[in-house]
Amino acid sequence: MIALLSAAPLQATAGVPFAQLAVDAPMLCAATMRALGSDSDLARLSAGGELRPLAARTLQDAGLSGPAGALAAAEALRGALWGALQEHLGGADARTVGDLCDRLAHVCVRLASAALASEQIDPLVAELERDGPLHTIDARDRRTPSWTAEIQRRLERFAQDGRPFSVLLVELDGIDRLRRAEIDDDVSAAVRTFEGALGPMLGPGDALLREAPGRYWLIAPETDEEAAGTLAERLAAAAPAGAEHRGVALRAVVGVARCPAGGGLAEELQAQAERGVYAARASGR
């Protein structure tokens, strides 16, 4: 369970059902170990098997979703189980160890497949997509670019021409909690109002991508530190301008990362923007 949670984004842990995960994760570990030595037990984790829902539920409850999340969860589980197995392989020959390693990887791919097969289209994303101009990221569709891929593309361009850029993570504060407590129809008006306020702020060459309703990545070219800070303040101010739910104004928090100061990898810039969101929220900004 700890390995699965460690692989999940920090902001996803607020929605983790820990009590259920504490029951399911050991059961899944036991089922995975049995599948290492039995094709019939492997079939129980495969398509149509009675343990398939357990595998899907456990990986998703840990806060991981989409292809990348499912693979990260499966890899985390594989690493934890392999560490446990190594304690008992002291006298085994290299071929046996190699076969067991391959079998474990194969079983964990089945687990990731179970999680992906149960993914559902977010109804609020589908509703917003009918009206909004935002490019929506669908983590299940390899044809659509992820925000990480867009950041990477800008990094490649920076390597060619040296033009700096900024990455801003914009998040409606408490949106995940609100969506868990309310039906999507009650939240969509506030999110739509906020998204409508974001559009006019975009400049030439800006890329705004919706990771999820209320959570957005903005890649702004040729922005220095001052310009990025000003843009972040304008984005944060867009929420109280009209995004409210049941009479309560919603706040937005923004994290900023800059290239080249923030690093040369998309993951580094993404992590810096995430830290900025946590810092802004903690300071009440």
Image (cartoon, grey):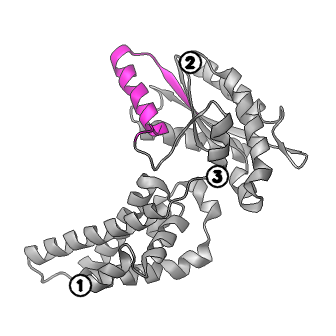
* Boundaries of the magenta span: 143-168
Check residue 161 for magenta coloring.
Answer: yes
- Report the residue at 47% width, 19% height from top: 164
Q: Quadrant of residue 127?
A: top right
Q: Disc 3 marks which amino acid?
A: Pro
Q: Disc 2 marks which amino acid?
A: Asp
Query: Residue 242's spot in the image, x, y percent?
Result: 84, 34
| Along the viewing direction, whichever of 182 and 275 lies nearer the viewer | 182
State the SS at label 3.
helix
Task: Compare marks 3 and 2 and give the one earlier in the sequence.
Answer: 3
Marks 1 and 3: CB-CB under 8 Å? no
Residues at marks 2 and 1, CA–CA distance in whole angstroms: 57 Å
Say which residue label 3 marks: 123
Q: Is residue 105 in sight in this rendering? A: yes
Mark 3 neighbour density, 10 Å: few (under 14) some (14–19) many (20 or more)? few
Check residue 192 for magenta coloring.
Answer: no
Q: Does residue 89 appear to the left or right of 154 in the view shown?
A: left
Query: Residue 241's spot in the image, x, y percent?
Result: 83, 31
| Disc sitting over residue 147 in the figure | none
Q: Quadrant of residue 231?
A: top right
Say which residue label 2 marks: 224
